[in-house]
Amino acid sequence: MASAKETYRAELRAAARQLGERCLYSAAKWAAELLVGVEPDASPVPSAAMDTPSSSSATSAGRLLHLHRSGGSSFRHRPRPGGGTSSEAGTPLGGVSYVSTPIPDDDAFDSGGDKYLLAKTYFDCREYRRAAHVLQKQVGRKTVFLRCYALYMAGEKRKEAEMIELEGSLGKSNAVNQELVALEKELSTHRRTGSIDSFGLYLYGIVLRDKGCEGLARTILVESVNSYPWNWSAWSELQSLCTSSDILNNLNLKNHWMKDFFLASAYLELKMHEEALKRYERLMGVFRCSGYIQAQIATVRYSMRDLDEAEMIFEDLLRTDPFRVDSMDIYSNLLYAKESLTALSFLAHRVFLTDKYLPESCCIIANYYSLKGQHEKSVLYFQRALKLNRKYLSAWTLMGHEYVELKNTPAAIDAYRRAVDINPRDFRAWYGLGQIYEMMGMPFYALHYFRKSSYLQPNDARLWIAMAQCYESDPLQMIEEAIKCYERAANSNDTEGIALHQLAKLHGMLGQSEEAAFYYKKDLERMEVEERQGQNFVEALLFLAKHYKSIGRFEEAEHYCTRLLDYTGPEKETAKNMLQGIKRLQSGFPSMDTDHFAL
């Protein structure tokens, strides 16, 4: 009896071939990379079928090699909790029973196989209308899909050309794919008559999505992945339509093992980081050598602000696959956040030599120039990335940040708005809009955008701090609301300690000395653990010394005064006077200083 891993390999091998033959190269690449990511069995069973690939398999593999970048080398992975070691692991998620989905037979070469081969060649050469014309009178499901797909791509190609002609390479345009209406009519007829396969359903879902029929598009895409679960492109399109956890939970999906990959990716997109991490780490039990899963785990860690762990995983990936560009833009964001200029310079140089005309490469180089403070050059490379892929979300958002640095407010607003048009769940773009309107002295607009960003990323302390600072601003002076926001930030792993210090100051301003002392003490403990010194440290010591003296807790007041003697400046003299006053009070004489009244 074949092990689960052998079953996964057989399914993925067939899927990579079938997806490639249908010109779905991104999905074929994903399947092929996952195929080699399955951990080898400890004692492989000799098999003629495995040792000697059929000529058709070798031919189709050869056809795929030149069409997309190589991936899927064996990746080293550190042991993680939940990862199995048995070569006969039944499923990626222990105890889950998966349904069996038969791999469909191709029907292309039953009739008109030569024409299909010619049409596929035209498609690969981007001659989409010629490809569709060749298959005009063919009726097989496979040929119908390729003909409709070629027409869709021809419409997209023309739409891109119109956008550039009307508005320029980065301009907005109302141009639409003129093939959508005819394609919707034909594909809906095929679905009604039952003469459509899962690939046709996938295309039908895309057409409906482009026409704005998102609910029906989700239904069609669910049908597609249920009948052929190995098409990762269909799962990705379905994920883009799952904008909330409620929508995700209401999908009627078969319990195939590909569903686990989909849910993990959807959880990551919906900022459900803990759930995503658990899924990916369990999947590693079978797909232990998968670079895709490692990259996703690194992305989750980055999103959770666990930068050191994410960096180690990305370094492993690059060490094993030095020509990898996929997900390296996330790695460049991480290096930017850590201000690791040397590492970012090395990464930018590497991707430049690998393929400088990939959108991800341009984004990495842009991050490098931004960290060097060369913001004009950074904008230039972000623009190059967007010319290669107008829907590259990160490039729009990060270019907005660069325009903020250049004080080009209109361009920054446009970039951020383009980002939220592509993905309304991009909290960074909403946050950027909030910053822009705050700089323009429009706090109510700023608060609107900060609220949107914090709703999408409720565990990010930076967003709550930005909102609190907006409430604190002179036009608003809504101190109570600011305190609530700082409390949320303090409970959201505020690594910089801004929230605790501001909470202490604001409570002090309101005369709430007990609350202020509580937060100053917590802030002091944090700074001691992190071995930080500075003005905030001195301010906390001084307040606590005065507070405890005022309520008669002289030993604690003396403790903080003594610590202040280690610092220079007026605080040292204040501490000396307070110590003298404390000694007089303890000896029964009235204090001659008034510092304890100056809280």
Image: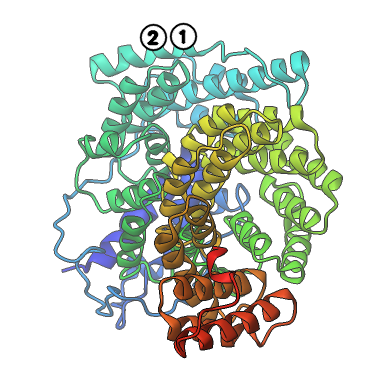
Whether tag 1 and tag 2 are in contact, CB under 8 A, the answer is yes
Would residue 102 be found to the left or right of residue 445 on screen?
left
Eyeballing the image, is 170 above or below 136? below
Eyeballing the image, is 198 above or below 52? above
- At 51% across and 30% down in the image, what residue appears? 448
User: In terms of depth relative to the viewer, which is nearer, 410 or 202?
Assistant: 410
Q: Mark number for residue 185? A: 2
Type of the residue with mark 2: Lys
Q: What is the distance, in whole Å, between disc 1 and disc 2 at their CAs? A: 6 Å
Q: Quickly name the residue at label 1.
A: 181
Type of the residue with mark 1: Val
Q: Mark number for residue 465? A: none
Give the crowd class for mark 2: few <14, some 14-19, many >=20 residues within 10 Å. few
Q: Quadrant of residue 385?
A: top right
**Quarter containing the N terminus:** bottom left
User: In terms of depth relative to the viewer, which is nearer, 576 or 440?
Assistant: 576
Give the crowd class for mark 1: few <14, some 14-19, many >=20 residues within 10 Å. few
Q: Quadrant of residue 158?
A: top right
